[in-house]
Amino acid sequence: MNWQVIDYDWNHVRAFLATAKTGSLSAAARELRTSQPTIGRQIAALEQVLGVILFERGRRGLTVTAVGRQLLQHADAMATAAHWMSLTASGQSQDIAGEVSVTAVDFICSQVVVPVIRRLAVEAPALSIRMLSSNAIQDLARRDADIAIRHVRPDQPDLVARLVTTYHASFYAARSFLDRQGRPRTAEELKSIPVIGNDEPEPFIRIAAEHGISICEDQFRHPANSATLIWDLVRAGLGMAFLPDEFCRDMPDLERVFPDHAPFGFPVWLVTHRELQTSRRIRMVYDALAEELAARR
């Protein structure tokens, strides 16, 4: 197959990124220190050279199209690579110091944030990262954290959210549990499988129903308020749970309970305070987290 390389202007990609992130041409113009008509022309030029529509224009402003969201992930990766290339070439990464606090659910802290800390300990040894295990967006609103990893986009006007990737979740159980319990093939057989979750089973029941899987509240056992504990309970052979495919594929002791069912997709947002984007140390951690999260796709 012959692939055609499309030649485009990086400044046009920057205009696309800034507009998608800020939600308007005027805000993007302020961020890039240029004029609104210039941003509009750059986006139009990028749309023309790529042969796609990046934004839908409506009464409520601009909305990124489906193809635009796909391209946004690649544009984000390009921006991150350019940023790291600049820091590395100038030797500035060694000079970045201070503390950056990151909040995420405990499992994401261990699987994503810890590798980022290990990487930055070499690239920016004077930088310190403090982890906060939580899933409350109020952590950012109260200024308890600098950066948050969330599955819901916040609506606070002083926060900036970046859609990094989309993960997928399916029902998983330990292979040893399924060998002992049996692999359910019918709705009736499914009713005998315990479900591991938190104290609020309704969202899990609803998500399962949307994917043609019927479970009931009586099946829920051993509720835990920790994502890591839910994983531990599943791996201990105590039932099945909704777990992200992107992490389970590295765990051979786990098996998808319904391999023929389509997984449930959920977004991964990287959130910070608007004014903190200008901080070099926060930007470094922010970009490193985005790269690590996207690498799990």
Image: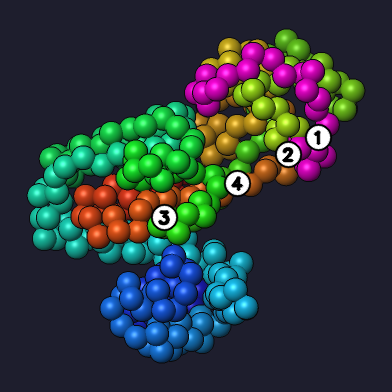
Q: Earlier in the sequence, mark 1 or mark 3?
A: 3
**Considering only order in the chain, which callout, 2 or 4, is on the residue closer to the N terminus?**
2
User: Cα distance, mark 1 to mark 3?
Assistant: 36 Å
Amino acid type of the residue that numbered disc 4 sits on in the rendered structure: Phe
Q: Residue at x 76, y 37 (%)?
A: 206
**Would residue 282 be seen by someone viewing this image from the given angle?**
yes
Q: Which residue is mark 3?
A: 159
Q: Quadrant of residue 186?
A: top right
Q: Which mark is residue 207?
A: 2
Amino acid residing under circle 3: Leu
Which of 94/144 is in front? 144
Residue 288 lies in the magenta stretch: no
Q: How many marks?
A: 4
Residue type (three-letter) at the residue carrying disc 1: Ile
Q: Secondary structure at mark 3?
A: strand
- Return the residue at label 4: 266
Start-end of magenta stretch: 206-229
Going by the picture, which residue comes out furthest to the front? 142
Q: CA distance from mark 3 to mark 4?
A: 20 Å
Q: Residues within 10 Å of mark 2 (few under 14, many from 20)?
A: some
Q: Is residue 73 above or below residue 103?
A: below
Q: Which is nearer the eye, 234 or 127?
A: 127
Residue indicated by mark 1: 213
Gap in angstroms between the C-alphas marked 3 and 2: 28 Å
- For residue 162, say whether it is visible: no
Identify the residue at image location x=32%, y=72%.
Answer: 31
In the image, residue 214 lies at what x, y percent? 83, 31
> In the displayed structure, does residue 251 sit left or right of residue 26?
right
Residue 80 percent coordinates (x, y)? 32, 59
